[in-house]
Amino acid sequence: LQVDDLGRWLAGARGQLDLRGEMSKRRQLAVRGGGSDLKFAGIEIPAADLSLAYGLSQGQIYLALTAPAIRQGEYRLEDVQLTLEGSAKQHQLQLATGGRIEGQLQIEGQSDDGVWHGVLQPTELATSAGPWTLAEQVPLQWSVERGALEIAAHCWQHSQFTLCTADMLAGRQGDLNLRLQGDVNAFNGFLPPGLKAQGALQSRLQLAWDASGVTTLEGTARVTELEIERLFGMGERVSIAWDSIDLAASREGAALAITAQVVRQGRRVLDVDALLPGTAQQSISGNVTLDTLQLVTFAPWVTELSTLKGSVSGKLALGGTPAEPRASGELVLQDGHLVVVGNPTELTALNLSLQLDGDSRSEERR
């Protein structure tokens, strides 16, 4: 099987496939080959090798898939190896990675009468921010009739962070209860290169759904003394600190209520109170208030700018629909200062007033 352009078969995909198979006299199917320049659903695989052996008589299978790298945006896994060995009744699945996240996940499973039982084995994932450890086995179960995966309660531990879940259900029906507590620098090994964070986080999330949609959603998060640093090329860097950030989300009928408060240098610089509708045709409502919000707050994420300074104040009323959101009100920019990375041109002393009225806007220099 040779595919010169995967995009002809899958919309939005690209890449080439070259697979060759043969059947032996002992009814052994062997398939070998690989792919190059693969991309689908935002995931990029520059190269991959596949090896498959399947015995039609005994039902034994061995599958090995290797890729030097798998990328999605700024995230990257290296030296990826996926293997499946055994039979439909009893088998072992293993995923191993190297590079910035090094370790393996191993699941041993067996199936009987439409029910699959498995166990995720204890493991440790090494990252640049220290190891994450799963200290005990995690029972798993999948029922074809129920169409859901059951995952037993367990915790991932880092020296400075704990991530725990109660018994979890995921499928046509779902039930998720997460608790996170510790210093967010434990996640630095998972962040894109050049991005670092630290701060104390306490968070919980309860989420449930059925065939009709989300039935329960309750979540809160509070992070204090948060600091984020972004490294650019040529030794340039920017860092920003907040006193605290509080987020809350809850289900109110079919709508989702969201509140957020951001405090920096003793001042509440951002306040959000919004209600998002249950359908794309219904209206959004709420308000966003900014009080001398420093533009440097966004610098770690705006990588095209080496300098981003100034402050924004104002109040916006939210409206429209999720498909076409609108805002009305006034935003005032004071002492704006912008410098593009690698460009000596600077924009300084920017003082603007921006009037928003749903579909229209007007600007006024000050």
Image (cartoon, rainbow, N blue to C red):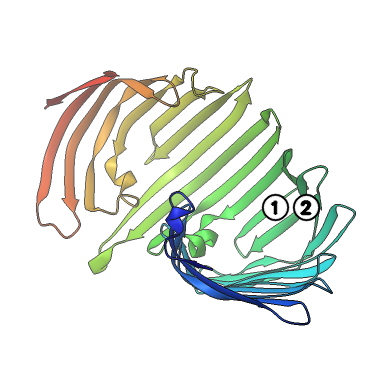
Residue at x 81%, y 42% (from the top left corner): 146
Q: Quadrant of the N terminus?
A: bottom right
Q: Which mark is residue 164?
A: 1
Q: How many marks?
A: 2
**Crowding near the residue tagged with mark 1, few <14, some 14–19, many ≥20 C-alpha atoms within 10 Å:** some
**Crowding near the residue tagged with mark 2, few <14, some 14–19, many ≥20 C-alpha atoms within 10 Å:** some
Q: Where is 50 relative to 153, above or below? A: below
Residue under pointer 2: 153
* Residue 79 visible, this angle: no
Occupied quadrant, residue 74: bottom left
- In primary-sequence order, the first of circles 2 and 1 is 2
Q: Are marks 2 and 1 in contact (CB under 8 Å)?
A: yes
Q: Where is 56 relative to 298, above or below? A: below
Q: Is residue 290 left or right of residue 6?
A: left
- The amino acid at mark 1 is Cys
Q: Where is 169 relative to 77, above or below? A: above
Label 2: state its secondary structure: loop
Please state which of residues 209 and 295 is positioned toward the viewer in this rendering. Answer: 209
Occupied quadrant, residue 176: top right
Please state which of residues 8 and 94 is positioned toward the viewer in this rendering. Answer: 8
- The amino acid at mark 2 is Ala
Residue at x 76%, y 82% (from the top left corner): 25
Q: Is residue 239 left or right of residue 47?
A: left
